[in-house]
């Protein structure tokens, strides 16, 4: 893990890093974070690890809970090169949105391909983060994501025992994700947008139903998946605090 | 409104009252509650205003938020006399539960009859509570309930503009409730039990969908409607605090 930069804003230290081909960012409390829970943040398809909503969420987790938050760009996203397959998938997605043809199959194929690469990348990132002295192997680990971040997160959580709590937003569901959900037994919180004209209601209900966790909840809000309301930003923080604990060193 | 008793426990003053035929209870902070939000608590069918879960919830709202909480027995429940129709409905309900015949039609008829009487009773109770000097007409009013308390609460909230936020748990849905939900435009939070073998999932999804409020949310938990988890007790308190404010005089 190679750190490229370190900046500090409002009590949050932000460090950009690379790990081989992976480009990532780590947010941590300026007051120190030894042993604090680590939250892995999975971005929506088409955007990147430092989209404004994700940065705001990371700052909230760091400043109100003392958590550490890590995010990586999915393959073909953010600071990572796009290949011909990425361009073709994006073009097909834009065309489907314009012509009204179903987006679900295009997204399913592309997300499957991205998740196959992203799962081992997240696992390598966790290895590298655990080797950092201010994180270590004792920090409890949670995962949170939206859309593509859910597709990757479900596949990752199903095979990665170091993740012990997960929060999943809306996503196009397909068979591999439903099968992954059936393997998940850790505490999980699902959130879906009730009036999403692209994803619809059923995928979230189906994944929630499939998830094998005894401790699971589903939260439904009006609007589309990009219209989450402000007060919900703390819902994830409360969920992770309940299951991963709070940073011992938090002075706030 | 005639007060029968006043007791105090853990900073909560509990006053039982009658108002004509209505039997009720009022919980308020020992530290005073002038202008604090008032929450109306509607009990589940077959139980009464002071069932243990409702008392615990009322104490939580009073001690952590400084709210005042009022509950009345539904007709034929708690300290109120049962008539022949109450006994017949209860017998039919028990028989249906034993034989496996559908409970929904029995519940729909009985709840409709109870709600017709309970709505004006709640309105008279609100009048009387607002005449008390420590409540008055300025206190914002919320309503929370489960099953029968939802049936009554939906009908009440649809016609009673003094209620400005409402939290509804699981309930058997029927046409009159769906029509009531369509009239409701205040902030509403629905909660349903995903694995409820009696009520099922669909009624809660249907009522949430029908509700005309722009500010509404639906929260789904595994298990049956009587298996709500401990940490959810604060969800209602957060919802009412967001929409009704917090007591000014709260010293905690």
Image (spheres, coloured by chain):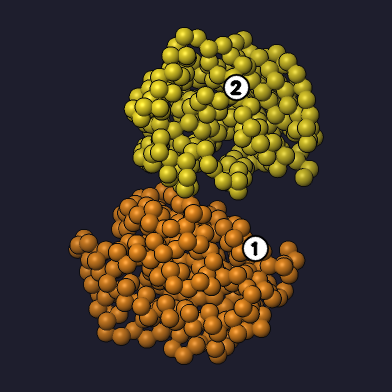
Chain colours: A orange, B yellow
Q: Which residue is mark 2?
A: B72
Residue at position x 44%, y 88% from top? A21
- Image spot of residue B112 (x, y percent): 41, 20
Quadrant the N terminus of chain A occupies: bottom right
Disc 1 chain ID = A
Question: Looking at the image, is B249 positioned above or below residue A30?
Answer: above
Residue B212 image-quadrant placement: top left
Question: Looking at the image, is A84 positioned above or below residue A238?
Answer: below
- Give A51 or B230, whichever is nearer the viewer: B230
Total numbered circles: 2
Mark identifier at residue B199: none
Quadrant the C terminus of chain A occupies: bottom right
- Give B222 or B136, whichever is nearer the viewer: B222
- Image spot of residue A182 (x, y percent): 39, 61
Residue at position x 36%, y 40% from top? B202
Disc 2 chain ID = B
- Image spot of residue B52 (x, y percent): 64, 32
Nearer to us of marks 1 and 2 is 1
Q: Which residue is mark 1?
A: A245
Could you say whether the residue bearing mark 1 is in a helix, strand or loop?
loop
Q: Are marks 1 and 2 in contact (CB under 8 Å)?
A: no
Q: Are labels 1 and 2 assigned to the same chain?
A: no
Lateral position of residue A8 relative to residue A117, left or right: right
Determine the CA span between mark 1 and mark 2: 39 Å
């Amino acid at each position: 893990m190679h750190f490229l930069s370190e900046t500090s804003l409002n009590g949050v230290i932000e460090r950009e890093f690379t790990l081989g081909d992976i480009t990532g960012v780590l947010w941590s409390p300026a007051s120190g974070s030894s042993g604090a829970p680590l939250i892995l943040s999975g971005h929506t398809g088409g955007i990147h690890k430092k989209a404004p909503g994700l940065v705001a969420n990371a700052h909230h987790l760091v400043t109100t809970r003392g958590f550490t938050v890590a995010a990586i760009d999915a393959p073909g996203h953010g600071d990572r090169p796009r290949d011909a397959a990425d361009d073709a998938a994006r073009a097909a997605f834009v065309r489907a949105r314009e012509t009204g043809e179903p987006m679900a199959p295009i997204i399913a194929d592309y997300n499957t391909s991205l998740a196959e690469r992203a799962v081992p990348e997240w696992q390598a990132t966790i290895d590298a983060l655990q080797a950092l002295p201010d994180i270590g192997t004792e920090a409890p680990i949670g995962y949170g994501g939206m859309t593509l971040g859910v597709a990757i997160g479900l596949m990752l959580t199903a095979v990665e025992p170091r993740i012990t709590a997960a929060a999943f937003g809306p996503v196009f569901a397909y068979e591999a994700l439903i099968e992954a959900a059936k393997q998940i037994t850790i505490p999980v919180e699902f959130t879906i947008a009730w009036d999403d004209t692209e994803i619809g209601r059923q995928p979230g209900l189906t994944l929630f139903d499939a998830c094998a966790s005894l401790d699971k909840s589903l939260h439904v809000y009006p609007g589309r998946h990009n219209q989450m309301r402000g007060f919900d930003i703390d819902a994830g923080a409360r969920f992770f605090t309940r299951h991963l604990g709070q940073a011992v060193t938090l002075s706030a």
